[in-house]
Amino acid sequence: MSPASANYDETLSTLRYAERAKSIVCEARINEDPNKKLIRELKEEIHRLQSVIASQNTQISSPRHGLKSIEKKSCSENFRKIGL
């Protein structure tokens, strides 16, 4: 960048580039296979649901009261995604 009028076009181009560069947002993402991601999420949900069942089994003597209807729906939706 130069204050000389002979370099006006180059200076203007540099300033435009700098303005565009300021607006760039960098988001870091893990490169993960979509199938592996779904499997990981389902395993996490299984672990969470097992914890819910375990806590309910200590509070309720009958195991028939296991999952809430919302959790059953969420679980069945995930199984449908993977084709089970």
Image (spheres, rainbow, N blue to C red):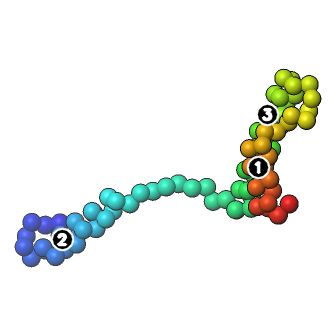
In primary-sequence order, the first of circles 2 and 1 is: 2
| Residue at 13% over, 74% down | 7
Residue occupying the point 34% across, 59% down: 23
Q: In front of the other: label 1 or label 3?
A: 1
Is any part of residue 12 visible from this angle?
yes
- Cα separation, mark 2 vs mark 1, equals 58 Å
Secondary element at image label 1: helix
Which residue occupies the extreme left position in the image? 5
Tell me the CA gap for discs 1 and 3. Answer: 15 Å
Mark 1 lies on residue: 73
Res 25 quadrant in image? bottom left
Q: On the image, numbered disc 2 is attached to which residue?
A: 12
Please report whichever mark, 1 or 3, sits nearer to the chain's N-terminal start: 3
- SS state under label 3: helix
The amino acid type of the residue labelled 3 equals: Val
Q: Nearer the viewer, mark 3 or mark 2?
A: 3
Q: Badge 1, how many Cα within 10 Å: few under 14, some, many 20+?
A: few
Q: Secondary structure at mark 2?
A: helix
Taking 14 as reference, is 32 above or below it?
A: above
Q: Which mark is residue 11?
A: none
What is the x, y in percent for residue 38? 73, 56
Q: Is residue 47 visible?
A: no
How far apart, in angstroms, are the residues tagged by discs 3 and 2?
Answer: 62 Å
Residue 25 lies, with reference to residue 54, above or below; the image says: below
